[in-house]
Image (tube, rainbow, N blue to C red):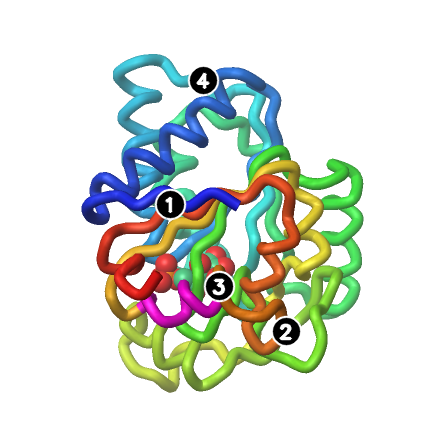
Amino acid sequence: MKVIIAKDYEEMSRKAASILAAQVALKPDSVLGLATGSSPIGLYKNLVRWHKEEGLDFSAISTVNLDEYVGLPKEHDQSYRYFMNDNLFAHVNIDPANVNFPDAMAEDVEKACEEYNAVLESFGGADLQLLGLGHNGHIGFNEPADDFCKKVHVTELTDSTIDANKRFFASREEVPTRAVTMGIGNIMKAKKIVVVVSGADKAAILKASICGPVTPAVPASILQFHPDVTFVVDEAAASEL
Ligand code: F6R
């Protein structure tokens, strides 16, 4: 495991974006696993800038997103599909046919999980998976649990996750309580993993994830077993390491 400590959010975003840009440049038909949330927004801004100013080419890239809220249509401004369009896809030359999300609006959401799992397996794992870190140690929406859940599944969001995400909604009641997420097994199949973590409020969980025991009570701790994982964190997040 590598830990890169950047001065602040901007530097973290630039450093992490350069790992993704190198992946895109060196293997133009890469499968990128992508995350939403506040942590990767600056990273996506850099990728968009490098596409516009330097021609970073996404035309042969495929993407698989980590998760999606159950019950939010893709036009909803808090759906993760909307987030990805808004922050990346609409601003680069990615082929919409190569963008993959779980269908969290499906009537039979369990079947939609199986179908998304099959899509992920058809790629044999992402070339590079980008992750953020939840305050409770979640990656994707794999919440703390008794076991690591391997495949794509529906998850009940914990109170801590709903509280953390209510800032994006008009009220707490509007935050969906369920999501479809890649499982830990899907994430761990990625050839390379990059985790972006920012802010003093993530310092304790970053320490637990990197230095603590590997346990499903801290889902990100499983990353200690991955052969190629890089945490790119700012000084505030690194303050307890
Ligand atoms: C997002 C995701 C989540 C976030 C995590 C951190 O697709 O899967 O695991 O990465 O909740 O969110 P932020 O970056 O908003 O602190």
- Mark closer to the observer (1, 4): 1
Q: Quadrant of ligand 1?
A: bottom left
Q: Is residue 198 above or below residue 205?
A: above
| Amino acid on which disc 4 is placed | Asp
Q: Secondary structure at mark 2?
A: loop
Q: Main secondary structure of the magenta part?
A: helix
Give the magenta range: 202-208
Residue denoted by label 1 = 232
Q: Is residue 9 above or below residue 162?
A: above
Tell me which label, 2 or 1, sits earlier in the chain. Answer: 2
Instruction: Please tell me whether mark 3 or mark 4 is closer to you in this view.
Output: 3
The label on residue 211 is 3
Of the image marks 3 and 4, the number of the one nearer the N terminus = 4
Q: Is residue 142 left or right of residue 54?
A: right
Q: Ligand 1 closer than 8 Å to the CB at disc 4?
A: no
Q: Are marks 1 and 4 in contact (CB under 8 Å)?
A: no
Which of the labelled discs sits on residue 5, or is there none? none
Task: Kindly indicate the quadrant of the structure image that contains residue 175.
Answer: bottom left
Residue 191 in the image: x percent, y percent? 65, 37
Q: Secondary structure at mark 4?
A: loop
Residue at position x 61%, y 43% from top?
Answer: 100
Of pointers 1 and 3, the one earlier in the residue sequence: 3
| Quarter of the picture holding the C terminus | bottom left
Give the residue type that dot 1 points to: Val
Tell me which residue sits at (50%, 82%) in the image. 158
Please name the residue that numbered disc 4 is placed on.
57
